[in-house]
């Protein structure tokens, strides 16, 4: 008799598959909103876009090896994400807007992340130690059906995670790291079962991680993978398959090391040690909301599968290994929440293994809480949108006018129809789930994933004009253009990388650093940098022409100077 029986008790009826059309439609509704119809947002999104824009116009390979914006290096040591964005702009047809062209490869990487996460859990669940208890008279779930149902649940858990929504829809190196990190997760999970596809995923994932600004993560993953492959005591079939993949895995690790070393990508900023209680509380709050609702399920998995944690059980050890590196990076480096993003697929995998151990009462509690939570937020979004359009109710309309002064709401039929269809689908799903007691393994995560997708869809349709107004530099640049008009270039002083990118993209001017004699007819100075302006330029060559603030942030005000000898 097995001394450590599996806590999973699953019937064949509970291992039914989630309809593919429903799963694909959910993924489509999650991926597309946020990539369509919006401006680049502050700060990391437009900063990365500005770097790609300058890279696309640069003819020299030296610039491609050191991506920068107006001489300021990119925030991370990544190369590949900036290359992908620049190539997308260069290959895009003339009629396509550059900010949309840049998003195409990143949208594909988000879709690839979801697919790789699904297949990773599918292969982990096929492992014998992950299988449910065999019944005395049969009727337990078949291995392939059980693995498919768990993979569906993990994908739903990943989509439901709050921290994934914004960062996965930005054109930044963080999304590329997420994609290649998930590709490594899939490669390691599939090694015993896919001797060709798994090494190929590792050969792409580990160097991709190194080129996306995470060389240390790539090397740690590679080193641990080599140790895991060489670890004795595995079943003969698994050991043979893993050792067959050893040359490819070693090649992937060496390629990552060589690329990172040759391109000087090893830059790791250690965070100062947190000595205040407020710092640790803030970090704890980040972990709690960023990984919700996966972390309670992860804790339940670790408790229910605790007897298997000390053994060589890949379905538990591998996700823990994958998640531990970004979790540690979040604590000990300055990467913060963008490092924590890499842990979400592995945490969702662990969350999925809680599903076979749930009791009906716990599943019902999750369902009712989710229905009330997301329905409440959907109502809030709709009410505020109605207030923006009609002025009624008066209080939400007044709050919008206070937070976004000067914003003029617009009615967009496609956005309204998409939001209405999404809301009707949510009502139908909630009625189906709460009205019938389905036995499917993934049932407890359908509503969290659908609710998160609904709220994201409503925000990116109904609230998108207001969010664009509040999070974009476009309104400030439009007002600035009324003052400056067309100019061959503008000098800038004290502006951050996002502001410089906005000057170039939204304003249409070529920015140049303000140094020495005046070269451009206009000078833009950040209000916080005016004290250092006399040391950079000769103020006798300039006269004040006004100031332009960003409507939703008075701290981001630009002082405008005109050259004294510049004609109109």
Image (cartoon, helix red, strand yellow):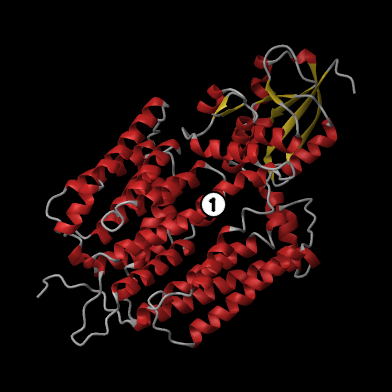
Q: Residue farthest to the left? A: 1
* Element class at badge 1: helix
Quadrant in the picture for the C terminus: top right
Asked which quadrant contains residue 401, the reply is: bottom right
Point out residue 317 in the picture as x, y percentages from the top left corner: 25, 56
Check the image and report above or below for 454 versus 332: below
Check the image and report above or below for 519 versus 465: above
**Residue count near mark 1 (Cα–Cα under 10 Å), binned few <14, some 14–19, many ≥20:** few
For residue 395, say whether it is visible.
Answer: no
Residue labelled with disc 1: 108
Left or right, residue 224 beside residue 440: left
Please report the residue visible at 37 percent of the width from the left and 76 percent of the height from the top. 441
Asked which quadrant contains residue 312, the reply is: bottom left
In this view, the residue in front, 360 or 565, is 360
In this view, the residue in front, 58 or 447, is 58
Point out residue 413 in the picture as x, y percentages from the top left corner: 77, 65
Check the image and report above or below for 71 versus 112: above
Q: Residue farthest to the right? A: 568
Left or right, residue 433 beside residue 250: right
Point out residue 409 in the picture as x, y percentages from the top left corner: 78, 58
Please report the residue visible at 53 percent of the width from the left and 70 percent of the height from the top. 450
In this view, the residue in front, 288 or 482, is 482
For residue 297, say whether it is visible.
Answer: yes
Number of numbered callouts drawn: 1
Quadrant in the picture for the N terminus: bottom left
Please report the residue visible at 54 percent of the width from the left and 43 percent of the height from the top. 172
Left or right, residue 514 beside residue 486: left
């Amino acid at each position: 008799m097995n001394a450590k029986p599996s806590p999973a008790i699953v019937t064949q009826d509970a291992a039914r598959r989630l309809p593919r059309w429903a799963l694909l439609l959910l993924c489509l509704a999650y991926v597309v909103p946020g990539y369509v119809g919006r401006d680049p947002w502050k700060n990391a999104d437009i900063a990365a876009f500005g770097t790609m824009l300058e890279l696309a116009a640069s003819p020299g390979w030296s610039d491609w090896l050191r991506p920068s914006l107006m001489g300021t290096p990119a925030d991370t040591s990544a190369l590949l994400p900036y290359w992908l964005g620049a190539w997308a702009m260069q290959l895009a047809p003339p009629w396509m807007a550059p900010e949309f062209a840049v998003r195409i490869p990143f949208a594909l990487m988000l879709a690839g992340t979801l697919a790789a996460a699904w297949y990773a859990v599918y292969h982990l669940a096929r492992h014998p130690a992950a299988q449910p208890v065999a019944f005395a008279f049969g009727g337990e779930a078949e291995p392939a059906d059980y693995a498919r149902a768990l993979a569906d649940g993990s994908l739903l858990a990943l989509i439901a995670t709050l921290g994934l929504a914004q960062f996965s829809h930005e054109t930044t190196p963080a999304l590329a790291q997420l994609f290649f990190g998930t590709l490594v997760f899939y490669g390691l999970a599939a090694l015993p079962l896919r001797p060709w596809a798994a090494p190929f995923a590792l050969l792409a994932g580990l160097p991709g991680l190194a080129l996306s600004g995470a060389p240390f993560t790539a090397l740690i993953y590679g080193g641990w993978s080599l140790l895991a492959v060489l670890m004795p005591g595995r079943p003969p079939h698994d050991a043979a398959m893993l050792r067959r993949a050893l040359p490819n895995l070693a090649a992937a690790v060496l390629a990552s090391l060589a690329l990172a070393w040759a391109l000087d990508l090893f830059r790791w900023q250690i965070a100062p040690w947190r000595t205040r209680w407020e710092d640790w509380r803030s970090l704890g709050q980040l972990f709690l909301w960023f990984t919700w609702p996966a972390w309670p399920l992860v804790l339940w998995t670790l408790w229910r599968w605790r007897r298997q944690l000390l053994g060589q059980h890949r379905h538990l050890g591998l996700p823990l290994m994958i998640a531990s590196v970004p979790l540690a990076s979040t604590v000990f480096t300055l990467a913060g929440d963008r490092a924590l993003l890499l842990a979400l697929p592995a945490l969702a995998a662990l969350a999925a293994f809680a599903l076979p151990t749930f009791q009906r009462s716990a599943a019902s509690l999750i369902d009712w809480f989710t229905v009330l939570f997301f329905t409440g937020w959907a109502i809030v979004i709709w009410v505020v949108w109605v207030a923006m359009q009609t002025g009624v109710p008066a209080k939400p309309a007044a709050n919008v006018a206070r937070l976004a002064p000067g914003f003029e709401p617009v009615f967009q039929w496609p956005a309204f129809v998409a939001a209405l269809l999404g809301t009707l689908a949510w009502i139908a799903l909630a009625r189906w789930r709460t009205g019938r007691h389905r036995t499917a393994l993934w049932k407890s995560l359908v509503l969290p994933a659908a609710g998160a997708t609904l709220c994201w869809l409503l925000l990116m349709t109904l609230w998108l004009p207001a969010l664009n107004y509040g999070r974009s530099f476009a309104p400030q640049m439009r007002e600035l253009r009324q003052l400056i008009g067309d100019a061959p270039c503008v000098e800038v002083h004290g502006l951050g990388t996002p502001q410089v990118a906005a000057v170039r993209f939204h304003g249409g001017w070529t920015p140049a650093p303000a140094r020495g004699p005046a070269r451009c007819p206009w000078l833009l100075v950040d209000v916080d940098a005016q004290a250092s302006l006399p040391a950079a330029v000769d103020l006798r060559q300039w006269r004040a022409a006004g100031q332009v603030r960003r409507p939703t942030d008075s701290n981001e005000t630009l002082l405008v100077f005109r050259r004294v000898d510049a004609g109109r």
